[in-house]
Image (cartoon, grey):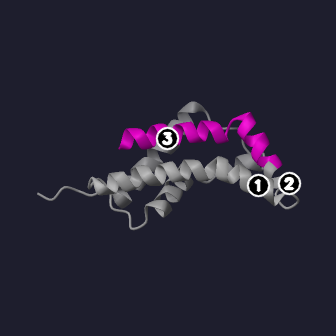
Amino acid sequence: MDQVLTRLGERYLHHIYSDWGLQNLRLLITEAKRSPGLAETFYRAGPAVGEGRLTLYLERAKQRGLINPPDCRRAAGQFIALCRGGDHLKFMLNLIDPPSAADIESDVSSAVAMFMAAYEIKPQY
């Protein structure tokens, strides 16, 4: 499970820190008030799909007895937020450069560890 979350988290961070991801998100945020339909279409086609897939994965892991979050949809959002961490806002505000691949790897590793510490079912001996 750790490997799947790690791969997902790293792909997600590489995407949101890419020039394409940054430019599109800034544009969507700028236009969201004027064009709420555009913002909704973007959200439904992108972030909502990813969160839905992660929710389904977590629900299956819960059924297999690997984790026990009370709400898998909320846990999916929490994992995504843990990966994004505090630096994403600084990046969006152009206060810092995008993280290196090593920084992304470290951030995701910490996010996976925190997520699993909260929700992993420990074997009873």
Q: Residue at x 29, y 53 (%)?
A: 66
**Residue underneath mark 2:** 31
Between 109 and 11, the residue placed more toward the observer is 11
Q: CA distance from mark 2 to mark 3?
A: 28 Å
User: Element type at marker 2?
Assistant: helix
Residue type, numbered disc 3: Leu
Tell me whether the residue at label 1 lies in contact with that at label 2, contact meaning CB atoms closer than 8 angstroms: yes
Count residues near mark 1 (Cα–Cα under 10 Å), then give few for <14, some for 14-19, many for 20+.
some
User: Element type at marker 1?
Assistant: helix
Residue type, numbered disc 1: Ala
**Mark toward the viewer: 3 or 1:** 1
**Residue underneath mark 1:** 39
Residue 5, magenta (yes or no): yes
Tell me: 122 left or right of 90: left
Between 119 and 40, the residue placed more toward the observer is 40
Q: Residue at x 30, y 56 (%)?
A: 63
Q: Residue at x 61, y 36 (%)?
A: 14
Q: Residue furthest bottom?
A: 70
Between 90 and 37, the residue placed more toward the observer is 37
Quadrant containing the C terminus in the rendered view? bottom left
Which mark sits nearer the N-terminus, 1 or 2?
A: 2
Q: Which mark is residue 8?
A: 3
Q: Tell me which secondary structure the magenta stretch mostly adopts.
A: helix
Q: Residue 123: x percent and y percent?
A: 19, 55
Which mark sits nearer the N-terminus, 2 or 3?
A: 3
Residue type, numbered disc 2: Glu
Residue 84 in sight in this render: no
Magenta-tinted stretch: 1-27
Q: Residue 57: x percent and y percent?
A: 41, 49
Between 74 and 95, the residue placed more toward the observer is 74
Quadrant containing the N terminus in the rendered view? top left
Q: Residue at x 37, y 60 (%)?
A: 118
